[in-house]
Amino acid sequence: MQLSPSEGLSSSHAVFTGEVTDIERNETTRFGGLEVTLRVKQVWKGAPQERTKVHTAGSSAACGYSFVKGKTYLIYAVRDEADPMRVSLCSRTALVENAKEDLDFLGKPSHQFDNSGGRRRSCSASPGSLGGTNVAWVAFLLAGTILTMRRSG
């Protein structure tokens, strides 16, 4: 039984989109299998670097996910004692074009890489700008100040 988007998010160490740039044999952990290098684009959970490596088993029979170089995926990675970033066939990892339900659920990413030098930028309001909620509070306070001045004047 596959997890829901909510369960996938809560059970994962990291959730992000990334383009596969390289696939090699995993010789860095005892997990074995494959080491997949991704150019991270958007992040919803965790703190992957612009270039992040995930591991998966070498075959689907061992729950390995079949990545294709050049394709972009929505990654749900788990962390355990054997491996810091592992992806399995049983996770909600999917090609971005097949992940509409998940992307709708996840909403706006917490971070996004501009992919032109590895700078990470926040997707929230830029420094010094006011978000919609703050603008409403300022307008409310301004209206209150004007009414108070009119009544006392």
Image (cartoon, rainbow, N blue to C red):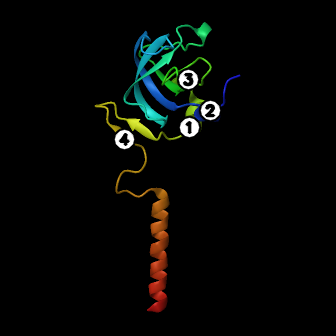
Mark 4 Cα-neighbour bin, 10 Å: few <14, some 14–19, many ≥20: few
Q: Residues within 10 Å of mark 2 (few under 14, many from 20)?
A: some
Q: CA distance from mark 1 to mark 2?
A: 8 Å
Q: Earlier in the sequence, mark 4 or mark 1?
A: 1
Provide the residue designation for mark 3: 93
Disc 1 or 3, which lies upstream in sequence? Answer: 3
Q: Which residue is mark 2?
A: 5
Identity, as a three-letter code, of the amino acid under mark 1:
Leu
Out of 20 and 46, give the one closest to the viewer.
46
Per the model, the C-alpha gap separating discs 4 and 1 is: 18 Å
Name the amino acid, label 2: Pro
Q: Which residue is mark 1?
A: 106
Mark 2 or 3 closer to N-term? 2
Q: Amino acid at mark 4?
A: Arg
- The quarter in which the N terminus is drawn is top right
Indicate the secondary structure of the residue bearing disc 3: loop
Percent x, y of residue 73: 49, 23
Q: CA distance from mark 2 to mark 3?
A: 10 Å
- Classify residue 63 by image quadrant: top right
- Which residue carries the number 4 mark? 121
Disc 3 crowd rating (10 Å Cα; few below 14, some 14-19, many 20+) is many
x and y, in percent, of residue 75 in the image = 51, 26
Mark 4 falls on what kind of element? strand
Q: Residue furthest right?
A: 1
Picture coordinates of residue 118 (x, y %)? Answer: 31, 32
The residue shown at (58%, 34%) is 9
Q: CA distance from mark 4 to mark 2?
A: 25 Å
